[in-house]
Image: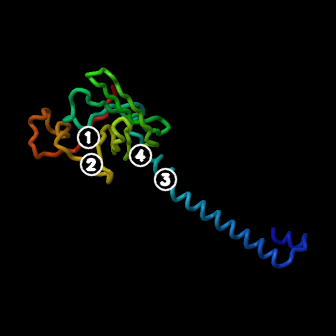
Amino acid sequence: MIKYFISNTKLNKMKLITLAVLLLTSQIVNSQVTNKSKKNLPSVNSVSEIALPFIGTRWFETDRGSSGNGTPDFSVRIEKNRNVYFIYSQTNRASGKTTIEEVFCGKFQTYLTVIFKNMNYEKMYYKIVGNKIYEVDSNKKIIKSNSCCSNSQYQNQDDIPENKECDCFGELYEN
């Protein structure tokens, strides 16, 4: 391209040098912007290589110790295109009013973050493995609680020792 300008126009050396510097600078800046934007994107292969545990909707309960009137129901829906939605549903027994919220969480990954607006913007973290779902903290460690023990070893909440803590998890089941 530069040879074309030299042979077909009468540019002086200063204009030619300026043009070359502008072209090189433009290519360098363009390359840096492209590289930065690639670094911020998750690898398509890493997300799409994770096998989906199921397609459809599954219900779950990870903390049986909190059951009672108006206890919320939770479900997770995974679509063929890997989109994940968490659904929160709760009926106020006194008023009969039902609150339902569906939250899009992005493409399926083993660890998922959900922010429920109807639960005062509570941020919850989950890990799905096979037909089980675990509550995890922001560091991806499984949450342990006394109220979660009935999910693992004890059938009756009253049988659980006071200082006992168990993994907060639940089976994913079809309704």
- Asked if marks 4 and 1 touch (Cβ < 8 Å), the reply is no
Question: In front: 156, or 72?
Answer: 72
Disc 2 from disc 4: Cα separation: 16 Å
Q: Earlier in the sequence, mark 2 or mark 4?
A: 4
> Mark 2: which amino acid?
Ile
- Asked if marks 1 and 2 touch (Cβ < 8 Å), the reply is yes
- Asked if marks 4 and 3 touch (Cβ < 8 Å), the reply is no
Quadrant in the rendering for residue 28: bottom right
- Asked if marks 2 and 4 touch (Cβ < 8 Å), the reply is no
Quadrant in the rendering for residue 103: top left
Residue of label 3:
42
Q: Residue at x 27, y 34 (%)?
A: 61
Residue of label 2:
142
- Could you say whether the residue bearing mark 2 is in a helix, strand or loop? loop
Q: Earlier in the sequence, mark 4 or mark 3?
A: 3
Q: Position of residue 132 (x, y in %)?
A: 30, 39
Q: Earlier in the sequence, mark 1 or mark 2?
A: 2
> Mark 4: which amino acid?
Gln
Q: Earlier in the sequence, mark 3 or mark 2?
A: 3
- For the residue carrying disc 3, how many other residues have a C-alpha within 10 Å: few (<14), some (14-19), or many (20+)? few
Disc 3 from disc 2: Cα separation: 24 Å
Compared to 31, does 152 lie above or below? above
Residue of label 4:
109
Disc 4 from disc 3: Cα separation: 11 Å
Q: Position of residue 124 (x, y in %)?
A: 33, 43
Q: Residue furthest front?
A: 95
- For the residue carrying disc 1, how many other residues have a C-alpha within 10 Å: few (<14), some (14-19), or many (20+)? many
Q: From the viewer's perspective, is 168 left or right of 34?
A: left
Q: From the viewer's perspective, is 34 left or right of 102?
A: right
What numbered label is drawn on residue 169?
1
